[in-house]
Image (cartoon, coloured by chain):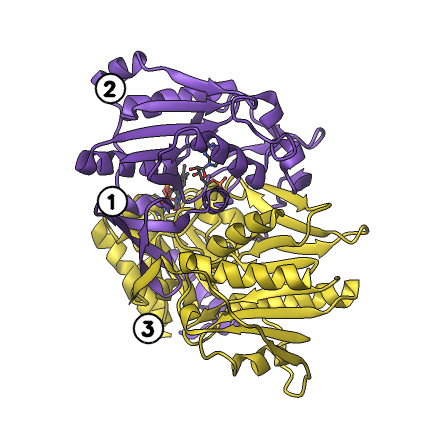
């Protein structure tokens, strides 16, 4: 009853980092409120992942393994997940706010006629034992705390990279259970024809330790090219604001922000970027932020660890010079 | 083909603040507009109509001023517009909104395809589309960046963690679209004149045959308990001096943070 569930997701043959981050948070909430942590995972030939999830903190791992679940599709996943949730009736169900989680969670929430909060940035349990879900709205200008007082389970999707990875403890013990998968013909009407692996440059952006980002202030495509040199020197990737994309200095798959990608690298360098909220939501989780802007009052400096007031056309070459000579 | 596009009216700028005293949103003087992804949904509907014929209906749930957004959709080229408007619909969360829209759309049947935006930029949930699909028992595909239809099936290129997943699904279906899918058209002067004659049909809760426990605040499982502006304390350290000096300081700082150079 007091159980906290995490619906784990697969990525590149393993577990998605967000699922492990959520498992860590669920463990912390459960230790505080006295429930168990259960991870539910669907896919095909995934049984070995069970032990891994236990090492990261699950008390029980429930596996739905079936050939029809090999690739994510809404309806088969929703069927299996709804079935087990109706049987076990957990208190809380958490999913990653990924393209899978944000597709699956609402389908299941509607089927269970319960509440769901999207894209949370924080979770806690209040005095009444309710899950407090903190989510941004208006492009992160406003934060709201949401609860689901009566309906169960309390469901939420949570943005990747807001919680740290939990510790992996080799000798942790837990239980692994399998569910039988029963699907209906209607569930299988949507078919996955192909997964186009575009893990080319653009998605590397989301995983890069260093992101060098250019805005309108780069001034021209030629100047923008300088960013690749800097990114190469730092072993990083290049991203951009919307105006830079609109100017065709770079492809739109590299856009950072509300309508682009979310990044949280160790180092983020913003060059000629003003720091509009629709942009900063996509980078504010970065560890160290360097901002270079000729306008000392640009809002981007509020997000920066180190700020440089100056012309990018002079500062970037100076930094490159310093890196290569020092 | 009958396509229904769900549109939401949202503030034009997201730069809203929470009143520190009343904890309400300060929204005075903020203009409204159609949620940007919903304009992509409209555009996609027009492109499909050009190919297959049929009609495009737009539907929105909201207060009377939403007529303005529906008027714009008509000017862009929608054939019919429906507003679901009733005080009892107020305070609806995703579940209640999807239920109400489903009740409205049932009155528009037969419908082949529903198009929504991938999310609304104000509340940013992206949940209405899938919850609507569930209420209707239809197939769904979300976050679509390219769409192709022949008479009997839909092929959708959907954003996923690995890259792009190509799904094929039958009608009827709910599809939510992102901005990559197309460039929305602007209303033309002719379109604006023609749309002036078109009616916006308004339905209240009774017209929708809606279960009163499933609409508005009563039908909403979630409750907002607090609204606040996020604290933004700046900890910036400004590096000053000649360009070379600034560059030297920065590189030294990065080394301190163990960034590989
Ligand atoms: C619904 C919605 C969604 C949006 N989504 C996104 C999104 O996902 N991503 C995004 O980026 N934007 C998005 N935007 C746009 C966003 O509001 C801003 O307009 C945009 O981020 C500004 O980009 P910028 O900083 O490059 O340009 P600007 O705001 O024009 O800033 C350029 C900066 O460069 C500085 N500068 C100029 N020349 C130099 C120089 N030689 N040296 C140093 N500095 C210089 C200027 O001082 C200025 O601060 C969205 C907007 C809306 C309404
Ligand atoms: N009140 C509403 N009326 C009509 N359509 C809506 C409404 N709310 C949301 N939608 C549709 O659902 C999409 C996702 O909205 P949301 O789930 O609120 O982020 C929007 O882009 C619209 O297409």
Left or right: residue A33 versus residue A108 is right
Chain letter, colour yellow in render: A
* Secondary-structure class at tag 3: helix
Q: Quadrant of residue B45?
A: top left
Residue furthest out toward the bottom: A171
Where in the figure is residue A242, as x and y percent of width and height? 34, 45
Disc 2 element? helix
Q: Which chain is purple?
A: B
- Marks 2/1: CA–CA distance: 30 Å
Of the 4 image quadrants, the one containing the N terminus of chain B is: top left
x and y percentages locating residue B123 in the rendered image: 53, 39
Is residue A259 in view from this perspective?
A: yes
**What residue is at 35 percent from the left and 52 percent from the top?**
A255
Chain that bears disc 3 = A
Quadrant into which the C terminus of chain B falls: bottom left
State ligand 1's quadrant: top left
Give the residue pinned by disc 2.
B191
The chain letter under disc 1 is A
Residue position for label 1 = A247
Q: Nearer the viewer, residue A52 or A234?
A: A52
């Amino acid at each position: 009853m007091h159980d906290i569930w995490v619906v784990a997701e697969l990525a590149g043959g393993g577990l998605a980092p967000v699922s492990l981050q959520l498992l860590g948070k669920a463990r912390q909430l459960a230790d505080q409120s006295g429930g168990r942590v259960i991870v539910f995972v669907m896919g095909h030939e995934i049984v070995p992942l069970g032990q891994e999830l236990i090492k990261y903190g699950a008390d029980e791992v429930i596996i739905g393994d079936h050939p029809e679940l090999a690739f994510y599709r809404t309806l088969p996943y929703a069927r299996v997940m709804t079935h087990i949730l109706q049987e076990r009736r957990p208190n809380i169900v958490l999913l990653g706010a990924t393209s899978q989680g944000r597709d699956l969670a609402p389908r299941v929430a509607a089927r269970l006629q319960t509440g769901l909060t999207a894209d949370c940035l924080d979770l806690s349990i209040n005095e009444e034992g309710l899950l407090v879900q903190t989510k941004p709205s208006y492009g992160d200008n406003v934060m709201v705390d949401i609860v689901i007082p009566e309906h169960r389970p309390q469901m939420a999707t949570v943005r990747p990279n807001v919680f740290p990875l939990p510790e992996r403890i080799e000798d942790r013990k837990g239980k692994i259970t399998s569910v039988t998968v029963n699907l209906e013909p209607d569930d299988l009407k949507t078919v996955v024809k192909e997964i186009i692996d575009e893990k080319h440059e653009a998605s590397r952006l989301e995983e890069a330790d260093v992101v060098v980002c250019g805005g309108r202030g780069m001034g021209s495509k030629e100047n923008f090219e300088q960013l690749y040199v800097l990114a190469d020197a730092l072993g990083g990737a290049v991203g951009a604001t919307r105006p830079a994309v609109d100017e065709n200095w770079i492809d739109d798959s590299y856009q950072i922000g509300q309508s682009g990608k979310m990044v949280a690298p160790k180092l983020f360098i913003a060059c000629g970027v003003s720091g509009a909220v629709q942009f900063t939501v996509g980078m504010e989780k970065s560890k160290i932020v360097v901002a270079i802007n000729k306008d000392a009052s640009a809002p981007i400096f509020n997000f920066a660890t180190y700020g440089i007031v100056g012309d990018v056309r002079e500062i970037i070459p100076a930094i490159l010079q310093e890196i290569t000579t020092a | 083909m009958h396509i229904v596009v769900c549109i939401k009216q949202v503030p034009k700028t997201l730069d809203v603040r929470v009143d520190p005293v009343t904890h309400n949103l300060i929204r005075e003087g903020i203009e409204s507009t159609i949620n940007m992804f919903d304009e992509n949904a409209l555009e996609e509907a027009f492109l499909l109509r050009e190919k297959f014929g049929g009609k495009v209906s737009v539907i929105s749930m909201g207060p009377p001023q939403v007529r303005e957004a529906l008027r714009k959709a008509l000017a862009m080229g929608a054939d019919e517009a429906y507003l679901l408007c009733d005080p009892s619909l107020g305070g609806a969360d995703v579940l209640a909104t999807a239920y109400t829209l489903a009740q409205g759309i049932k009155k528009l049947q037969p419908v082949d395809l529903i198009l929504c935006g991938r999310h609304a930029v104000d509340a940013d949930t992206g949940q209405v589309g899938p919850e609507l699909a569930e209420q209707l028992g239809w197939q769904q595909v979300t976050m679509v960046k390219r769409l192709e239809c022949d008479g009997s099936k839909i092929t959708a290129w959907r954003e996923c963690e690995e890259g792009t997943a190509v799904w094929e699904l039958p009608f009827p279906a709910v599809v939510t679209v992102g901005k990559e899918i197309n460039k929305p058209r602007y209303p033309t002067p002719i379109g604006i004149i023609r749309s002036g004659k078109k009616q916006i049909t308004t339905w209240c809760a009774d017209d929708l045959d809606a279960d009163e426990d499933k609409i508005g605040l009563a039908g909403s499982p979630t409750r907002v308990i607090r609204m606040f502006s996020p604290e933004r304390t700046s900890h910036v350290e400004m590096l000053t001096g000649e360009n070379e000096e600034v560059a030297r300081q920065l590189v030294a700082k990065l080394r301190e943070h163990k960034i590989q150079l």
